[in-house]
Amino acid sequence: MGSVNVPAMGIEVVRYNYRLRPGAVAERALTQEWHRCRFLWNEAVHQAKTGVRPTFAKLSKLLTEARARSSWLRDGSQVAQQQMLRTYAQALDASFTVKGRGWPRFKARKKTLPSLEYTRRGFRIREGRLVLPKGVSIPVVWSRELPSEPTSVRIIQDSLGHWYASFVVTRVAESIQVADQTSAVGIDWEVSRTATATEERFDLPHAGHRKRCAAELAKSQRRMARRRHGRGHPPSRGYRQARRTAAKVQKKAARQNRHDGRIWAKTVVDAHHLIAVEDFKPRFLSKTNMARKAADAAVGAIKRELVEQGRRAGRKVVVVRPAYTTMTCSGCFARAKQPLGLGERIFRCWVCGHTACRDRNAARVILAVAERGHTGVDDVSQVDHLPSGGGAVAV
């Protein structure tokens, strides 16, 4: 029995990205607008460092006064400048409410890529072109049609100098129902294999795209080092070419990882009703000898893609804390007395004698925890007399 389309679930807000082809005049205008917005961001950061916590209302009032005094700011769009201050105020609030979020930092001129945001009153789509304030008109490569009128747009530039427009639109959210409503899968993240599922056919192998490009990237970086003239000297044309080549190699590997992750996520989402995902945060690996391989696997990006596709498809997505998932037996839920070393790839239960692949066992534990409505292994324990059917029970 194949998949069946079900009625629409409602309205969802999504982003549609398109390539922009600005001319020399439009690109110069976008760059100048970015420098104005960057200046306002840095001024707001400076105020926060002096002990004053500026809100968006205070920043808007200061912006009005600054535009009255400075003709340089008046030459830019007030909408883009207000949106930059709004983004700063949201980032500042998040630093107080979200654990682990640091304070907003200065945006350096040479290290920060341009990013501008306009609300509906700050842009128009006319004859296939994106029209911005101050007479800036940019052709758009319409790779697909917009499902509705966009409410805002974000214009960004990547490391290669390409410009993109990200439109926020609303569309009808449709859910594709799977044939088996009891189908479920558990996902355990790792480095040697990017994702290990409860079923082997849904594993995501480690492709190693960045590793294959490492030699070419190192060659471009050595060329950059030879052509660098030192501080105080403008970069030469050869240096800019070498830097662009290195950026191309890095972006190619990132695109390959994103493409593989999207295809794999769609395969998992289309075949399962319940998706249990380990809440793995690869940040701690950045200071270990696995940092390069962890970055190559791009676990964080693939996890976000899987959760987002599952949410949009109407699946039940459960994020499980990773604590003790490797040390717990998927057969009897007994916990090992000592943590397993990274060299131990086979899990052996000292209670029931269950033996399985370490990562496959962890994926089954994650699925079992999600099926019982918990968020971590701490909520589940082993008892002497199990109910009929065996398994683990909630404490």
Image (tube, rainbow, N blue to C red):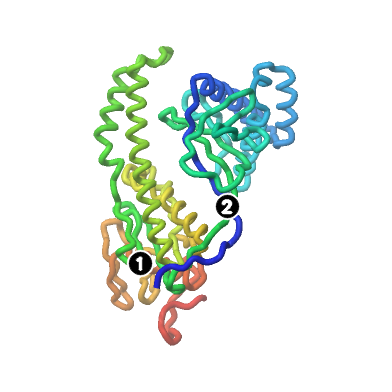
> Residue 22, image x and y in percent?
50, 26
Q: Is residue 331 visible?
A: yes
Q: Nearer the viewer, residue 208 or 228?
A: 208
> Residue 145, image x and y in percent?
52, 44
Image: 143 above or below 105: below
Which residue is the site of mark 2? Answer: 171
Instruction: Determine whether label 2 and label 1 are within 8 Å by CB.
Output: no
> Residue 115, image x and y in percent?
54, 32
At label 2, counting other C-alpha atoms closer than 10 Å, the crowd grade (few under 14, some 14-19, many 20 or more) is some
Image: 88 above or below 180: above
Q: Nearer the viewer, residue 164 or 248?
A: 164
Q: Amino acid at mark 2?
A: Arg
At label 1, counting other C-alpha atoms closer than 10 Å, the crowd grade (few under 14, some 14-19, many 20 or more) is many
Q: Nearer the viewer, mark 2 or mark 1?
A: 2
The image quadrant that residue 131 belongs to is top right
Q: Nearer the viewer, residue 93 or 122?
A: 122
> Residue 368, image x and y in percent?
43, 71
Q: Amino acid at mark 1?
A: Thr
Which residue is the site of mark 1? Answer: 198
The image quadrant that residue 271 belongs to is bottom left
